[in-house]
Amino acid sequence: MDAIRELKTRAEILHRRIQANDHRAIGRLRVLPHFRRASYEHLTATAAGIQRRDCLTVIAAELGFASWPEAKTAIPGAAPAGDFGPLPYPPHCCGGHPNPRCRPH
């Protein structure tokens, strides 16, 4: 399956769960800068106004990208991307080389 299509599917699922007032899904909105410090009550109150593009941005941010357009460009390799975020090296990795002193977080 195409990677971009997979991410769009994940955003669609997230959007449906937010609309169904799924607590975990609503909490994932905190990855967005304007919701980072929002109370859960505020997130719940604004859940009805969340759009699919917001969910695409959440998915992109969870992968370490600044925006959905940046992720959409970088993932398939269609055009050079400036920053891949932590995608190539997740937090439990120590960069591009093995280091026996590096321990998972």
Image (spheres, grey):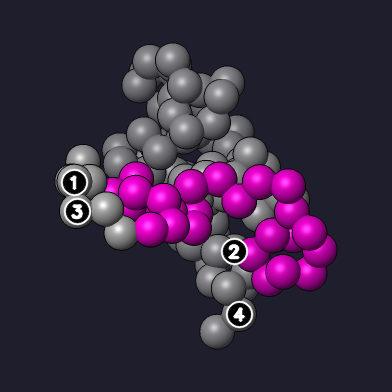
The mark that comes first in sequence, 3 or 4, is 4
Residues at discs 1 and 3 in contact (Cβ within 8 Å) = yes
Please identify the dominant SS of the magenta region: loop
Can the viewer see residue 105?
A: yes
* Residue range highlighted in magenta: 72-97
Q: Position of residue 58 (x, y in %)?
A: 53, 43
Quadrant position of the C terminus in the picture: top left
In the picture of the structure, the residue carrying the numbered disc 2 is 8
Q: Amino acid at mark 2?
A: Lys
The one nearer the camera, 1 or 10, is 1
Q: Earlier in the sequence, mark 1 or mark 2?
A: 2
Q: Nearer the viewer, residue 65 or 84?
A: 84
What residue is shown with label 1? 101
Query: What amino acid is labelled 3 in the image?
Result: Pro
Q: Is residue 93 left or right of residue 73?
A: left
Is residue 94 located in the magenta-colored stretch of the structure? yes
**Residue 100 bears which disc, if any?**
3
Amino acid beneath label 4: Asp
Marks 1 and 2, how far apart at CA:
38 Å
- Tell me whether the residue at label 4 lies in contact with that at label 2, contact meaning CB atoms closer than 8 angstroms: no
